[in-house]
Amino acid sequence: MLRVTSLGSGSKGNSTLVQYKSTNILVDSGFSCRELESRLSARGVLPQKVNAVLVTHEHSDHFKGVPAFANKYEIPVWMSKGTSLHPTVSKLKDLNLFNSHVDFVIGEINVEPILVPHDSREACQFVLSAEQSRVGILTDLGHITPFIVQKFQQLDALLIEFNHDKSMLLHGKYPPKLKSRVGGPLGHLSNEQALEFLSDYNCSRLKVICAMHLSEENNCAELVQSILEELTSGLSVDFVLADQNDGFDWIELV
Ligand SMILES: [Zn+2]
Ligand SMILES: [Zn+2]
């Protein structure tokens, strides 16, 4: 069966692991090599068993840890052409480019890149699938586009960004420039935006919603928890909040 786990999520580092049979795909790593090794070990996965690293975009909370880890274990790294133009990417020994409009296969997992509006070049998020199971990862985007709505359908698990509460961001400590970046159309998805997307979402197939990339400064877990409790009440959909330190444990999608 297809399984997914978060090894940590938030502005201090993100990494998600998707597994099907013997294929392990790591999506991003904002953690040091040693930190990532220990987080993988907590989920029972040896670094040598990671078949590929997919990179969503070059921001350090997603990419900082990728070169050291991938080079050490000789793991191929996949990203869009736009992401590959960033200078830090030149450290990678095994760099592979995908066309962000074309699905491809790694081992036994199908990878569907989906372009998202974010302040980096050709940022992509992914729907990963195997047999009948589909998991969607959707973080680091300033707004939801009709294309995203169309692509993120018929999922069994949806990992979606709940970055900030709009009013907490507005009244919080961030300098004005950062506030407008985070809250702008190329920034991060607010609780309100995520909820709007989910309210219209056809949940007939969905088993679990995972709230990702919560801001420690401009959000609070209890708030996201209550939003999701209300949203899922009466539905047969579970939810989980991804933690900065421990992500969330394996979720199995039959
Ligand atoms: Zn991020
Ligand atoms: Zn980002």
Image (spheres, rainbow, N blue to C red):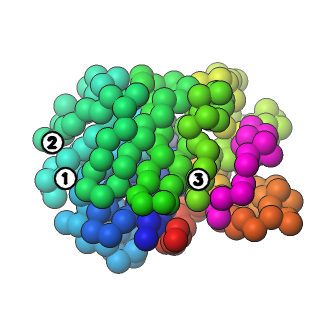
Q: Nearer the viewer, mark 3 or mark 2?
A: 3
**Residue at image coords 79%, 32%:** 170
- Cα–Cα gap, marks 2 and 1: 7 Å
Residue contact between numbered discs 2 and 1, judged by CB atoms under 8 Å: yes
What amino acid type should be assigned to the residue bearing mark 3? Leu
What amino acid type should be assigned to the residue bearing mark 2? Asp
Q: Position of residue 79 (x, y in %)?
A: 32, 36
Find numbered disc 2 in the image and state the secondary structure of the residue it sits on.
loop
Residue at the front extreme of this rendering: 132
Q: Position of residue 58 (x, y in %)?
A: 38, 34
Image disc number at residue 75: 1
* Residue 83 falls left or right of residue 162: left
Mark found first going from the N terminus, 3 or 1? 1
What amino acid type should be assigned to the residue bearing mark 1? Ile
For disc 2, the neighbor class at 10 Å (few under 14, some 14 to 19, many from 20) is some
Q: Position of residue 61 (x, y in %)?
A: 44, 44
- Image quarter for residue 78? top left
Q: Nearer the viewer, mark 3 or mark 1?
A: 3
Q: Nearer the viewer, residue 252 or 88?
A: 252
Q: Label 2 CB, ligand 2: below 8 Å? A: no
Q: Position of residue 34 (x, y in %)?
A: 28, 63
Q: Is residue 157 magenta?
A: no
- Give the residue pinned by disc 2: 94
- Give the residue pinned by disc 3: 155
**Magenta residues, start to end:** 193-208
Residue 58 visible within the image? no
Mark found first going from the N terminus, 2 or 1? 1
